[in-house]
Amino acid sequence: MKANSTIKFIFSFVLVVSTLSLSAQKFAYIDSKYVLSHMPEYVIAQKQINELSVEWQAQVEQKYTAIEQLEKSFQAEKILLTEEMKKKREADISERREEVKQYQKSKFGVEGDLFKKREELVAPIQEQIFQAIEDIASQSQYMVVFDKASHSNMLYTNPKHDISDKVLKKMGLKPGEVLDKDEEDKEDSQEKPGEKPGTGTGRPGNDRPSSPGKGN
């Protein structure tokens, strides 16, 4: 059980340029997953999130193991206990179990520590990408910019409308220089209580090629 974000987290950018006329609408899209894989700060952030998730999950499992031991001891000694002692032991076990559930929720819940840490680390990265997209959209007069990674209903995308490499160049990054692939794979395999992030992709056969040369 690891932090996903996406931190599995996924960007959805929709930029509207109000100065354009309706008769001259232009649109483009990016693959935020592809863009993020080029950013050193994202790789570092994802590694931090993964490490925290592993640490906290180990603590949760340790607490549950302790409760299981208490339950085994209780069952073994139950026949020797009075009714009052039985109730006290059962109440203690139930209380401990509830405490673990609350601890788990505080770490992995929707508003838990992992979520907050992901937001803290990802916000500056998201802003950097958004600013690059906004500049390109303004210069090229795009009415809308979609994110292929977060739109599962984008069944087909024409590569000539993909501005992912433009975004990378705008941020001073070289397209094709993907960083830590292992961290990206970890992110894709992450599962957390109450959260199973998905990554929107088109139908098979419509994936972006791994080599440089995205539409500019």
Image (cartoon, rainbow, N blue to C red):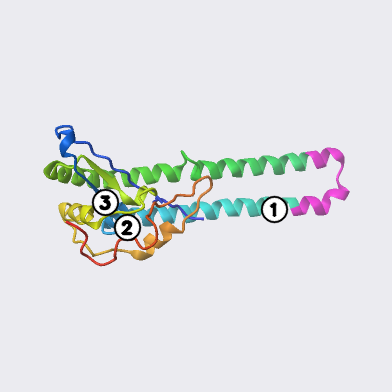
Q: Nearer the viewer, mark 2 or mark 1?
A: 2
Type of amino acid at the residue the image marks with label 2:
Val
> Of residues 199 and 3, which is closer to you in this image?
199
Of mark 3 and mark 2, the one earlier in the sequence is: 3
Of mark 3 and mark 1, the one earlier in the sequence is: 3
Task: Write down the quadrant of residue 42 in the picture.
Answer: bottom left
Q: Give the residue drawn at x 37%, y 57%.
A: 47
Task: Write down the quadrant of residue 61 in the picture.
Answer: bottom right
Q: Is residue 83 magenta?
A: yes
Q: Residue 90: x, y in percent?
A: 76, 42
Query: Which residue is the site of mark 2?
Result: 43
Callout 2: SS:
helix
Q: Which mark is residue 68?
A: 1
The span picked out in magenta is 72-87
Type of amino acid at the residue the image marks with label 1:
Glu
Task: Give neighbour class at mark 2: few <14, some 14-19, many 20+ (Cα, 10 Å).
Answer: some
Q: Is residue 180 above or below residue 202?
A: below
Q: Give the residue drawn at x 29%, y 65%.
A: 209
**Distance (Cα) linking label 2 and label 1:** 37 Å
Q: Which mark is residue 30?
A: 3
Type of amino acid at the residue the image marks with label 3:
Ile
